[in-house]
Image (tube, helix red, strand yellow):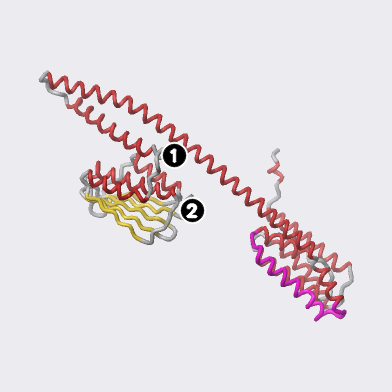
């Protein structure tokens, strides 16, 4: 049986701690010197309230810190002389939640208010008032509670960082393996398709030299071989985005648009918003989206113009590519590898991708890439 089978739920643990501290506070307060009458009833209620408030220490650590501190001032003013255990637990919880500065300010304020409260509501001398305040809130216990909360907070932060590192390492290894398999597949297909292409071209050449009619199927095989070779070459360029090849980013978009113009496409690039640095992964993804969109436009869309628009926003980078091709709203986008690759890249960064025909005719690809969440 695993140890997780015996794990106590957090809510049950909070209630157990709150009830235990409440019993400790009420028992300690009533067993020692304490007032009688209405002040005794008020002080006992404050002792119990301070302990029971700890039920919410995980959900509202700051509020619990304030309530337990006020309860400590209240039962001390009523005449009870008991260590403020609920406040110490609240200090631990607030520091663990990362509220260190607020905890220090609240504690210093409480250390000043406690002796003043004893002087105002007590009947003894100033020395006795300060002694009573020290009994309610010991400095040593305060330091211990603060140190314990900070130590656990640091340990949890290191554990979270280690978990993120493990996830990033696993994701990077998976990407590397996927890239390796893609390259192996590319090399294998390139070799086989090259053989088909060469054999078909030889057959066409021989048939024409003999003056024979070339079958349409053979011409189709020849054309398909050439097209497949071009597609595989373009795929290899995308796969070679590693340490041996400088990564392409936003600064390379003008070159990409210029190459699209050389293919006979009237392409334009517009950059809007205040330019700022973006993570390298975002820049690479934006480049690949524009590259794939322009390639599809030039080869398959039957378009004459394409507009690339990059918009810098405070927390996102917007990438949009539109063309005036033959696609219409009635045409469903073909689920090819290009769109699938774009969608995978955008999803990894936590963004959104929209690829669909435009109103009238043409096609649009729009991606929203978060800047702060990418790394």
Q: In which quadrant of the rendered view does residue 178 lie?
A: top left
Q: Position of residue 31 (x, y in %)?
A: 89, 67
Mark 1 sits on what residue?
243
Q: Position of residue 145 (x, y in %)?
A: 74, 60
| Real-space CA distance between mark 1 and mark 2, rounded to the nearest whole angstrom | 23 Å
Q: Which residues are magenta?
A: 97-126
Q: Position of residue 305 (x, y in %)?
A: 22, 51
Q: Residue furthest left?
A: 211
Task: Check if residue 110 falls in the magenta segment.
Answer: yes
> Which mark is drawn over residue 373?
2
Callout 2 secondary element = loop
Q: Is residue 224 above or below residue 320?
A: above
Q: Is residue 221 above or below residue 281?
A: above
The residue closer to the viewer here, 288 or 20, is 288
Describe residue 182's horizontal placement relative to residue 211 as left or right: right
Describe residue 2's horizontal placement relative to residue 359 as left or right: right
User: Are there few (<14), some (14-19), or many (20+) residues within 10 Å of tag 1?
Assistant: few
User: Are there few (<14), some (14-19), or many (20+) residues within 10 Å of tag 2?
Assistant: few
The residue closer to the viewer here, 24 or 353, is 353
Q: In which quadrant of the rendered view does residue 186 lie?
A: top left
The main secondary structure of the magenta stretch is: helix
């Amino acid at each position: 049986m695993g140890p997780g089978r015996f794990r106590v739920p957090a809510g049950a643990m909070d209630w157990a701690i709150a009830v235990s501290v409440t019993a400790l506070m009420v028992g300690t307060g009533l067993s020692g010197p304490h007032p009688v009458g209405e002040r005794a009833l008020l002080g006992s209620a404050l002792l119990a309230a301070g302990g029971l408030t700890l039920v919410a220490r995980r959900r509202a650590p700051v509020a619990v810190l304030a309530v337990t501190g006020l309860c400590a001032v209240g039962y001390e003013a009523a005449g009870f002389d008991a260590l403020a255990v609920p406040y110490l637990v609240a200090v631990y919880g607030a520091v663990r939640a990362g509220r260190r500065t607020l905890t220090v300010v609240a504690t210093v304020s409480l250390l000043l208010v406690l002796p003043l409260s004893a002087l105002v509501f007590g009947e003894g001398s100033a020395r006795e008032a300060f002694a009573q305040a020290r009994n309610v809130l010991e400095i040593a216990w305060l330091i211990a509670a603060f140190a314990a909360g900070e130590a656990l907070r640091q340990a949890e932060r290191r554990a979270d960082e280690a978990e993120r590192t493990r996830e990033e390492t696993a994701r990077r290894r998976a990407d590397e393996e996927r890239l390796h398999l893609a390259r192996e597949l590319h090399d294998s297909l390139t070799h086989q398709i090259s053989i088909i292409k060469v054999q078909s071209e030889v057959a066409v050449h021989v048939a024409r030299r003999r003056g024979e009619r070339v079958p349409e199927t053979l011409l189709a095989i020849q054309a398909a071989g050439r097209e497949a070779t071009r597609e595989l070459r373009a795929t290899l360029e995308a796969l070679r985005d590693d340490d041996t090849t400088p990564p392409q980013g936003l600064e390379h978009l003008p070159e990409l648009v210029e190459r699209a113009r050389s293919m006979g496409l009237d392409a334009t690039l517009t950059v809007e918003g205040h330019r700022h640095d973006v993570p390298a992964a975002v820049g690479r993804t934006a480049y690949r989206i524009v590259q794939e969109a322009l390639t599809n436009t030039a080869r398959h869309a039957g378009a004459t113009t394409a507009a690339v628009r990059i918009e810098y926003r405070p927390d996102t980078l917007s990438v949009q590519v539109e063309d005036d091709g033959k696609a219409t709203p009635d045409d469903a986008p073909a689920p090819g590898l290009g769109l699938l690759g774009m969608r995978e890249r955008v999803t990894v960064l936590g963004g959104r991708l929209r690829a669909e025909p435009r109103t009238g005719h043409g096609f649009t690809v729009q991606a929203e890439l978060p800047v702060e969440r990418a790394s």
